[in-house]
Image (cartoon, rainbow, N blue to C red):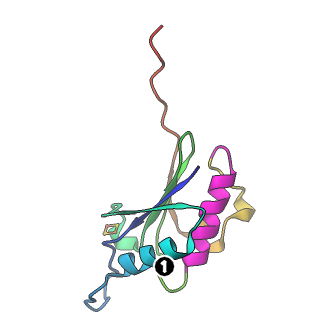
């Protein structure tokens, strides 16, 4: 299982004021196309200077924050990466299977959270 978080408040520097922010447009495009991936809107991934921004994560998996996304050009890149992440048990898709944009614009990767052990 993988979840794709999409920042809906992202606006790139220099963008004209728009009724619908680029992040919200990106979320809408992803939500419409992603029948097999859970797409969830969030407000700010703290990557505002390199927006638009997404994060792909899942239980027991590595988390990837990807930035510099264009809502008109990178829908397939993020969907393909989310599908590769979903297929990888540890959330680490092989480098060559990652879309070029993801290879070049990964902001951070975060290891899986370790849950406290059950009391004995
Ligand atoms: S507003 Fe989108 S990362 Fe901050």
Question: Residue 34 is drawn in which quadrant?
Answer: bottom right
Residue range corresponding to the magenta coloring: 74-90
Percent position of residue 12, x then y: 35, 81
Quadrant location of residue 8?
Answer: bottom left
Left or right, residue 77 beside residue 120: right
Q: Residue at x 50, y 86 (%)?
A: 72
Q: Is residue 117 above or below residue 56?
A: above
Judge by depth and name the residue closer to the eye, 36 or 89.
36
Taking 100 as reference, is 109 above or below it? above
Q: Quadrant of ligand 1?
A: bottom left
**Helix, strand or loop under label 1:** helix
Residue identifier under label 1: 29
Q: Main secondary structure of the magenta part?
A: helix
Residue at (52, 40) in percent of width and height:
112
Q: Residue at x 36, y 61 (%)?
A: 45
Mark 1 Cβ and ligand 1 under 8 Å apart: no
Q: Position of residue 39 (x, y in %)?
A: 48, 63
Residue density around tag 1, few if under 14, some if 14–19, many if 20 or more, within 10 Å: some
Residue 46 is left or right of residue 30, and the answer is left
| Image coords of residue 66 (percent x, y) | 50, 65
Q: Taking 28 as reference, is 11 left or right?
A: left
Does the stretch in magenta take in 87? yes
């Amino acid at each position: 299982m993988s979840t794709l978080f999409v920042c809906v408040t992202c606006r790139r520097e220099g963008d004209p004021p728009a009724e619908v922010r680029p992040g919200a447009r990106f979320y809408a495009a992803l939500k419409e196309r992603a029948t097999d991936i859970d797409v969830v809107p969030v407000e700010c991934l703290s990557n505002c200077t390199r927006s638009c921004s997404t994060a792909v994560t899942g239980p027991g998996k590595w988390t990837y924050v990807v930035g510099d996304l264009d809502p008109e050009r990178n829908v397939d890149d993020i969907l393909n990466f989310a599908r590769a992440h979903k297929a990888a048990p540890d959330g680490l898709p092989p480098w060559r299977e990652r879309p070029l944009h993801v290879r070049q614009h990964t902001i951070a990767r975060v290891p899986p959270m370790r849950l406290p052990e059950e009391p004995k």
